[in-house]
Image: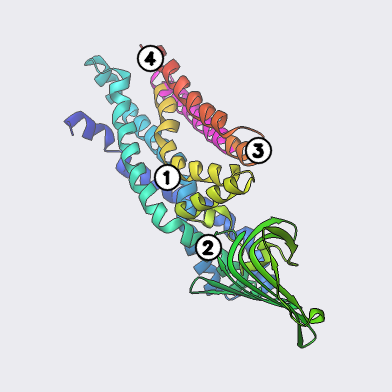
């Protein structure tokens, strides 16, 4: 690393942790006061609540990283501008791109580290936070037990054993269902595979069905719909949202939905969001930094900071809006990605031309 690059990046070592702590602190405060009333109503122990907040930290880091990194780079550039260091570097022949490039490269490299860390910690911590809140604090009683890859469910009039093959519980293998009438068994059902269709209906493959009124004589059912009386949602002690699934599980869910003829937009959007979101930091920083360098003369620092902050907030809001529209099926994923990249990059190119 060259001397001028170390000089430019010096303030970033101070501002990046500062903005990460500040934005994470705001996020935690909002979470604390949002949950406080429910905590008092449930009578949960404070220790478990702080454990819940601890489990939330990886997701909070995931949410605040791009904005915090972009704001830290902008603050670093503004800090150097106060003492006219940037003016001196421009007088020595340093182009605006040469001044901005070290920040963008550093943010990109740090985003790789953050992305790797979150890939290891985010899914498990998100589920643990959800489980701690729903079961340990609010004392919701789970009706299922998932152990050694098998699922056991005790319903009001049936018992179910199965092996989930898909994280959402929509594909089951080796399903055994016992219908009860009082304390007596009324029917048995075994299926090699069970695919969820809609409501409480499933498509069974390699199934055997026996009823008490037929003296439990087995009947073979192959590739036909059957009302099992439950949906996948009740099969999970705490339903796992998409953000609590690992990338491997999201990919498995995407393949399952695509093979089943259902829309795979939700897991595809989550995969792209999980993979690309940490790398938005240089994308958010580029237009803000270049816009800052377009201002000269009196009050250039205040004007540059104001425009940089507005651009960062605008493009961050655009990212959130595009994700919501893509998840809701109101915008094709490809178009959302196109707008996500062209907006900041187009603005950065425009401001780069204005700096010369």
Q: Position of residue 8 (x, y in %)?
A: 27, 32
| Disc on the earlier residue, 2 or 4 | 2
The secondary structure type at the circle numbered 2 is helix
- Is 197 above or below relative to 182? above
Dot 3 or dot 2, earlier in sequence: 2
Which element type, helix, strand or loop, lies under badge 3?
loop
- Residue 134 in which image quadrant: bottom right
Task: Please say whether residue 175 is visible from this viewpoint.
Answer: yes
Quadrant of res 183: bottom right
Is residue 295 visible in the rendered structure shown here? Answer: no
- Of label 1 and label 2, which has the lower sequence position? 1
Report the residue marked by disc 2: 127
Q: Position of residue 215 (x, y in %)?
A: 77, 83
Image point (48%, 46%), residue name: 274
Q: Which residue is mark 1?
A: 19
Residue ID for mark 4:
355
Q: Residue at x 56, y 51 (%)?
A: 256
Under circle 4, the secondary element is: helix
Inter-mark Cα distance, 1 to 2: 26 Å
> Residue under circle 3?
329
First reached walking from the N terminus: tag 3 or tag 4? 3
């Amino acid at each position: 690393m060259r001397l001028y690059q170390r000089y430019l990046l010096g303030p970033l070592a101070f501002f990046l942790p500062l903005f990460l702590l500040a934005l994470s602190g705001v996020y935690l405060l909002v979470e604390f006061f949002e949950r406080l009333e429910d905590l008092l109503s449930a009578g949960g122990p404070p220790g478990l609540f702080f454990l819940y907040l601890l489990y939330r930290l990886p997701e909070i880091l995931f949410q605040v990283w791009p904005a915090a990194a972009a704001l830290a780079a902008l603050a670093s550039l503004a800090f150097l501008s106060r003492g006219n260091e940037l003016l001196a570097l421009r007088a020595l022949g340093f182009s605006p791109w040469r001044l901005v490039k070290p920040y963008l490269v550093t943010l990109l490299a740090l985003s790789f580290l953050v992305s790797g860390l979150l890939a290891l910690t985010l899914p498990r911590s998100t589920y643990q936070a959800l489980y701690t809140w729903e079961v340990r604090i609010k004392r919701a009683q789970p009706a299922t037990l998932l152990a050694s890859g098998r699922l056991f469910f005790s319903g009001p009039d049936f018992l179910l054993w199965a092996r989930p093959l898909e994280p959402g519980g929509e594909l089951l293998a080796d399903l055994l269902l016992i219908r009860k009438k009082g304390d007596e068994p009324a029917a048995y059902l075994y299926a090699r595979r069970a695919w969820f269709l809609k409501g409480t209906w499933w498509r069974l493959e390699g199934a055997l069905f026996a009823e008490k009124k037929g003296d439990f004589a087995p009947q073979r059912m192959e590739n036909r719909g059957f009302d099992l009386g439950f949906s996948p949602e009740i099969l999970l002690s705490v339903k796992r949202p998409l953000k609590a699934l690992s990338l491997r599980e999201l990919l498995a869910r995407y393949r399952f939905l695509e093979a089943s003829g259902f829309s795979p937009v939700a897991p595809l959007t989550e995969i792209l969001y999980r993979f690309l979101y940490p790398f938005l930091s240089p994308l958010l920083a580029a237009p803000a930094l270049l816009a800052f360098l377009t201002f000269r003369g009196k009050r250039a620092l205040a004007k540059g900071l104001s425009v940089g902050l507005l651009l960062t907030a605008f493009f961050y809001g655009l990212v959130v809006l595009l994700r919501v529209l893509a998840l809701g099926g109101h915008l094709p994923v490809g178009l959302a990605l196109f707008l996500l990249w062209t907006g900041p990059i187009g603005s950065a190119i425009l401001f780069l031309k204005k700096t010369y």
